[in-house]
Image (spheres, rainbow, N blue to C red):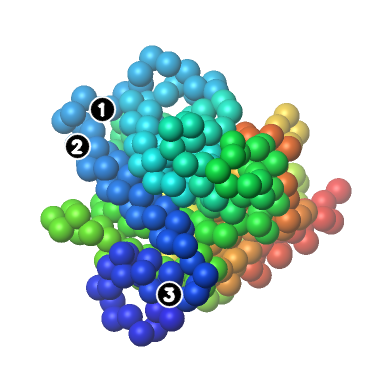
Amino acid sequence: MLRQFEEGTTLDRFIAESEHLHPDASGRFSALLHQVSLASRLVSARVNRAGLAGMLGATGDVNVQGEFVQKLDEYANEAFKRALEHAGCVGAIASEEDEGPYRVPERFYSGRYIFCMDPLDGSSNIDVNATIGTIFCVFRRKSEEGSPAQMSDILRPGTDIVAAGYVVYGSGTMMVLSSGRGVHGFTLDPYVGEFFLSHPDIRLDGEGRTYSCNEGYAGTWPDGLRAWVDARKGEGMGWKSRYIGSLVADFHRNLLKGGIFLYPGSKKRPEGKLRLLYEAFPLAYLVEQAGGAASDGQRRILDLTPSELHARTPLYIGEKALVEEIVEVLSTRE
Ligand code: P6P
């Protein structure tokens, strides 16, 4: 579909053309994407002024994760919830920042979609001006729209995802999105306030030679994984190590340039650190749409179902052949 588009197509046009592909479309999904675009532009403007607007630093609160809430975390969480709740398209929003699901208030229509998000991933990097981002995925609810959304609408297998994306707030702001027909990147022109198609049909070509992991924890990894990473450091192996410590930034680099991102579990924390519902799921959906793979070390990420809203998972994601190599290594570890 997008091949008809010259680069420079707007996100709005992409949304409209996507809707035309679904004859029975009600426009609710388009409304959801428009509101995500609005919230992303609000957060982008705030992130880019954070230093000046006194938005750096912590609020003094601690969130459900036990992490210090950064002012921008809170702002982003509110921006996406306010933008979505009245649009008649979502029934509930599951957010990293909230203990439980945010059900749409009764004064608004409880729509047909469930929106799961990490509103501002990587926020521990805010004060050092490192790239951060919003990560999200969308389910179509199983319960009757118009009624209060249920937990069973939210705790679903990743294979039920109907769309996913992220917004990376870096040197520029870019939204990377898929609703099942490939992965497409839209770059924000802050002077126009519009996202323009800059990266149509992003594909992983299997040539990546970058591994991305926090080697400070190598002592806690499964032995086989440590050996795999060490083997890539050999003279003339042609591998690079890149790790920003912001999942959305590390993933975005690997999606555009190839490679693999590794966040293993450890003996102390076998489930790892990253969240399944609103970090691993969205990126796994995107990477598979781009021809890559995502595993928890044994199982395909999208085949998993979260046991609770903030369930964690180990994450190995990127070039398909590299993920398969890692899974093989981990399956034969002593
Ligand atoms: P570590 C950021 O805090 C985050 O949640 C992800 O964005 C990132 O990939 C990970 O944690 C970094 O964790 O343990 O390497 O600092």
Comparing marks 3 and 1, which lies closer to the viewer?
3
**Separation of disc 3 and disc 1 at Cα?**
40 Å
Q: Position of residue 276 (x, y in %)?
A: 63, 44
Locate residue 212 relative to residue 11 in the image: left or right: right
**Mark with earlier residue (2, 3):** 3
Asked where in the image residue 86 lies, by quadrant, the reply is top left
Mark 1 sits on what residue? 55
Comparing marks 2 and 3, which lies closer to the viewer?
3
Q: Are marks 2 and 1 in contact (CB under 8 Å)?
A: yes
Residue lying at 24% horizontally and 37% vertically, measured from the top left: 46
Mark 3 sits on what residue? 20
Category of crowding for the residue at label 3, using alpha-carbon neighbours closer than 10 angstroms: few (below 14), some (14–19), many (at least 20): few
Dot 3 amino acid type: His
Category of crowding for the residue at label 2, using alpha-carbon neighbours closer than 10 angstroms: few (below 14), some (14–19), many (at least 20): few
Mark 2 sits on what residue? 49
Rendered-image quadrant of the N terminus: bottom left
Ligand 1 within 8 Å of the CB at mark 1: no
Category of crowding for the residue at label 1, using alpha-carbon neighbours closer than 10 angstroms: few (below 14), some (14–19), many (at least 20): many
Q: Position of residue 2 (x, y in %)?
A: 40, 79
**Separation of disc 2 and disc 1 at Cα?**
8 Å
Q: Are marks 3 and 1 in contact (CB under 8 Å)?
A: no
Residue lying at 36% horizontally and 69% vertically, measured from the top left: 16
Please name whichever residue, 25 or 72, is drawn nearer the observer in this view of the structure.
25
Whether residue 170 is visible, yes or no, is: no
Residue lying at 16% horizontally and 30% vertically, measured from the top left: 52
